[in-house]
C-alpha cells in the first residue's frame, strides 16, 4: 500500500497533461462547457494511458482505448435514450458487458485499458446528464483523446540531442537502456546484486521490445534512422547472452569489461559511432563471447545504415479471444461482471443522483494491473477522501469557469506523476472529476463522491473474495505455465541447434519475458489477503526453478557456441539438476511434472 514507483519527473508528459485541457478551454470560451466535459474525459483517460516509451508504440496504447471509450460512450447514450433504467435490466446488461470486457482485459495491458474504458464510458454515457446527444459526446470524447495523442506524437522531448531525429527519442532511450543494463550486470558479476541486475536487464529488454514494436506505415522501416535503431537493438542480443553467462559463473570481472557496453549506450543516444573498445580478454568461453559480441556491435554501429530484421508478426484476433476465454480470463471476467451488476443494482436502488459513479468506480478497482485488491481498495478510499477534502478547499477559492479549467489543467499536469501511486492518482482524478461536475452546472458533489467511492470499495472487496466455482489463482497458474513452456522450448532449442543464433535469441527473450510476467502475477497474489494468497502457495518455488534453468541454459548456449568448447560436465550436471528441481517444484504445486526425460538424456549424451 505504501510502495510507489520512483524515477525522474517525466516533464514531457507533465507538459502534455497540462496542454490536454485546451479543447475544454476552447469549448468553455465558446460557451459550451457541457460539450467540453466529454472532451476533458477523453483527455483524462488518455493521460492515464500516456506512459513512457516510443512515440509509435503510444498509438495503440492511447488510441485503441480511446476508440473503445468512444464506442462505449455511444452505446451508453443509446441505453439512456432507450430509457433502460430498470432495476433488473440495467444491472444485467452492465454485468454482461463486464463479463466480455473483463475477460478481454485479462489478456494484456492495452486490452485492459480498452476493456476498462468501454465499461466506464458505457456507464457514464448511460447516467451522466449532459444535453449533447450520444454521437456528439462520443466524437467529443475521441477529439479530446486524439488531441493528447497528437501532442504525444509531435512534441519533442526536453533535453534531446539535436543531431538525431526527435521522433525516435523514446525508442532510442529504450535501446540505450539495454546497453547500460548490460554494463551494470557485468559490474555486478560475482557480487550479491548480480541477480537483481539480471532482472533489470530483462526489464530493459522488455521495454525496448515494446518501444520498437509500434505500428509502421509499411512492412519495413521507413527511414535510415529507424533501420539503424533496430539493428542496434538486435546487436545487443549477443551481448546480453554473454553477460548473463558471465554473471551465472559468479566470477568478479575487471571494471574495464563494462566500458564497451557503456560506450555503445552513449553512441545510441548521440547517434555517433561506438568509439574505442576495451582490449579483449578471451580467457574463457564467456569472455570470448563478450568480445565477439562487442566487435559485431561495433561493426553495426559504424555502418551508416542498419539492417532491419524481418517484420514483426502480430497476434491474431483468434488467439486473443482464446486467451480471453481461458480459465484466468473467465475468472476475471466473472468477477468484473458481478461487480458491475451488483454496484449498478445498489446505485439504482438507492436512487443516488450520481448513481453512475458507483459502477464506474468498481470498474477501475477491479482492473487486473493495479496491484493487490485489498491494497487498491484502501488506496482508493484514502485517495477519494483526500481528493474530496482538497476540492472542498479549492471550491472556496474558485469562482468561475476559467478557474475551473485551470484546476483541470493542473490535475492533467499532475496525472503523469500521480500514476506512480494509486491513492495519489485517485486524489488527482477526484479533484478533476468534481471540477467537471461544477463546469456542467451541477452543485458541488464532494460528499456524494466519497459515499459512492466507499460503497464501490465495499462492493469490490466483498465480490473480489467470494468463493466462485472452481479453483482460484488461474492467473498465476496460467503465467507459470507460459513461463515453464517457454523455458522448455529454450532448453530444447539450445540442445538441438546451438548454432541457430537468431532462433536462440528469440526463445531466450520469450523465456525471460514470460518469467517476468509470472513473477509479477505471483507478487500481486502474494500481497492479497490470506484467503486469496493461499491459492498461489508454492508458485515462487516454481518461478525460482524456472529462472535458474533459463540462466543455466544461457550459460550452456555460450559454451556450445564457442568453437573450441563443448558442454562442460559442470554445466551439464547443473542443467540436469535444475530440470529435476523444476519437476519437484511443479509436483508440489499441482501434482504432476510437465517435463519429459528425453532432453535430459540428450544432455547426458
Image: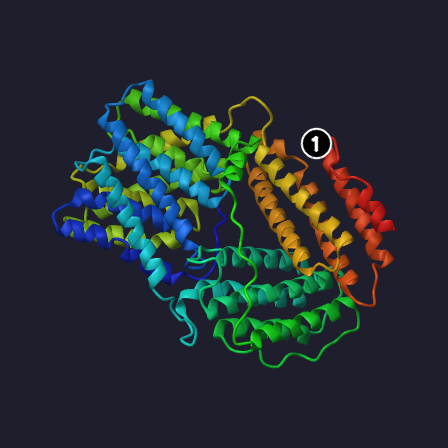
SS at mark 1? helix
- Image location of residue 320, percent across then percent down: 51, 39
- Image location of residue 118, percent across then percent down: 36, 37
Determine whether 542 is above or below 461 in the image.
below
Determine whether 472 is above or below 575 in the image.
above
Q: Is 282 on the left-hand or right-hand side of 10? A: right
Q: Is residue 132 visible?
A: yes
- Pick out the residue farthest to the front: 219
Could you tell me which residue is drawn at 39 percent across and 29 percent down? Answer: 97
The part of the image, by quadrant, that contains residue 12 is: bottom left
- Image location of residue 241, percent across then percent down: 68, 61
- Image location of residue 397, percent across then percent down: 18, 50
Could you tell me which residue is drawn at 63 percent across and 74 percent down? Answer: 260
Label 1 sits on residue: 590
Q: Nearer the viewer, residue 156 or 530?
A: 156
Could you tell me which residue is drawn at 39 percent across and 46 percent down? Answer: 64
Amino acid at each position: 500500500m505504501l510502495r510507489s514507483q520512483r524515477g525522474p519527473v517525466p516533464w514531457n508528459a507533465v507538459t502534455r497533461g497540462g496542454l490536454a485541457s485546451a479543447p475544454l478551454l476552447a469549448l468553455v470560451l465558446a460557451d459550451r462547457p457541457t460539450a467540453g466535459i466529454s472532451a476533458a474525459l477523453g483527455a483524462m483517460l488518455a493521460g492515464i494511458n500516456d506512459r513512457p516509451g516510443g512515440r509509435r508504440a503510444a498509438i495503440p496504447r492511447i488510441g485503441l482505448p480511446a476508440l473503445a471509450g468512444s464506442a462505449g460512450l455511444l452505446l451508453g447514450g443509446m441505453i439512456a435514450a432507450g430509457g433502460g433504467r430498470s432495476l433488473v435490466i440495467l444491472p444485467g446488461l452492465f454485468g454482461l458487458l463486464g463479463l466480455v470486457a473483463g475477460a478481454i482485459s485479462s489478456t494484456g495491458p492495452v486490452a485492459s485499458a480498452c476493456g476498462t474504458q468501454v465499461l466506464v464510458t458505457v456507464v457514464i454515457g448511460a447516467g451522466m446528464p449532459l444535453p449533447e446527444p450520444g454521437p456528439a459526446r462520443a466524437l467529443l470524447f475521441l477529439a479530446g483523446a486524439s488531441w493528447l495523442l497528437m501532442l504525444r506524437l509531435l512534441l519533442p522531448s526536453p533535453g534531446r540531442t539535436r543531431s538525431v531525429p526527435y521522433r525516435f527519442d523514446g525508442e532510442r532511450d529504450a535501446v540505450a537502456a539495454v546497453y547500460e543494463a548490460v554494463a551494470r550486470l557485468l559490474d555486478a558479476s560475482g557480487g550479491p546484486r548480480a541477480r537483481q541486475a539480471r532482472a533489470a536487464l530483462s526489464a530493459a529488454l522488455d521495454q525496448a521490445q515494446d518501444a520498437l514494436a509500434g505500428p509502421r506505415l509499411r512492412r519495413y522501416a521507413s527511414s535510415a534512422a529507424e533501420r539503424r535503431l533496430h539493428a542496434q537493438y538486435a546487436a545487443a542480443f549477443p551481448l546480453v547472452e554473454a553477460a548473463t553467462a558471465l554473471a551465472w559463473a559468479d566470477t568478479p570481472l575487471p571494471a574495464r569489461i563494462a566500458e564497451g557496453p557503456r560506450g555503445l549506450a552513449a553512441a545510441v543516444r548521440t547517434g555517433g559511432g561506438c568509439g574505442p573498445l576495451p582490449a579483449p580478454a578471451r580467457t574463457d568461453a564467456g569472455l570470448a563471447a563478450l568480445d565477439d559480441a562487442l566487435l559485431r556491435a561495433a561493426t553495426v554501429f559504424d555502418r551508416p545504415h542498419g539492417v532491419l530484421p524481418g517484420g514483426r508478426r502480430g497476434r491474431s484476433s483468434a488467439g486473443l479471444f482464446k486467451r480471453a476465454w481461458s480459465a484466468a480470463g473467465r475468472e476475471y471476467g466473472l468477477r468484473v461482471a458481478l461487480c458491475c451488476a451488483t454496484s449498478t443494482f445498489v446505485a439504482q436502488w438507492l436512487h443516488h443522483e450520481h448513481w453512475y459513479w458507483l459502477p464506474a468506480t468498481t470498474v477501475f478497482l477491479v482492473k487486473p494491473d493495479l496491484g493487490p485488491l485489498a491494497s487498491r481498495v484502501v488506496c482508493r478510499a484514502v485517495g477519494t477522501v483526500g481528493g474530496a477534502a482538497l476540492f472542498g478547499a479549492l471550491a472556496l477559492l474558485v469562482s468561475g469557469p476559467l478557474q475551473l479549467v485551470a484546476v483541470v489543467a493542473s490535475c492533467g499536469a499532475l496525472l503523469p506523476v500521480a500514476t506512480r501511486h494509486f491513492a495519489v492518482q485517485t486524489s488527482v482524478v477526484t479533484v478533476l472529476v468534481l471540477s467537471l461536475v461544477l463546469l456542467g452546472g451541477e452543485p458541488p458533489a464532494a460528499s456524494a463522491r466519497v459515499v459512492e467511492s466507499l460503497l464501490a470499495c465495499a462492493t469490490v472487496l466483498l465480490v473480489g473474495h467470494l468463493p466462485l466455482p472452481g479453483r482460484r489463482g488461474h492467473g498465476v497458474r496460467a503465467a507459470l505455465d507460459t513461463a515453464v513452456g517457454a523455458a522448455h522450448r529454450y532448453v530444447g532449442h539450445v540442445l538441438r541447434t546451438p548454432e541457430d543464433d537468431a532462433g536462440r535469441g528469440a526463445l531466450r527473450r520469450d523465456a525471460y519475458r514470460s518469467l517476468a510476467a509470472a513473477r509479477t502475477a505471483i507478487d500481486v497474489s502474494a500481497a492479497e489477503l490470506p484467503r486469496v494468497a493461499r491459492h498461489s502457495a508454492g508458485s515462487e518455488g516454481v518461478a525460482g526453478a524456472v529462472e535458474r534453468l533459463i540462466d543455466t541454459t544461457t550459460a550452456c548456449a555460450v559454451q556450445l557456441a564457442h568453437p573450441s568448447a563443448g558442454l562442460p560436465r559442470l554445466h551439464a550436471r547443473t542443467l540436469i539438476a535444475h530440470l529435476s528441481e523444476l519437476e519437484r517444484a511443479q509436483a508440489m504445486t499441482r501434482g504432476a511434472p510437465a517435463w519429459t526425460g528425453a532432453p535430459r538424456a540428450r544432455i547426458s549424451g
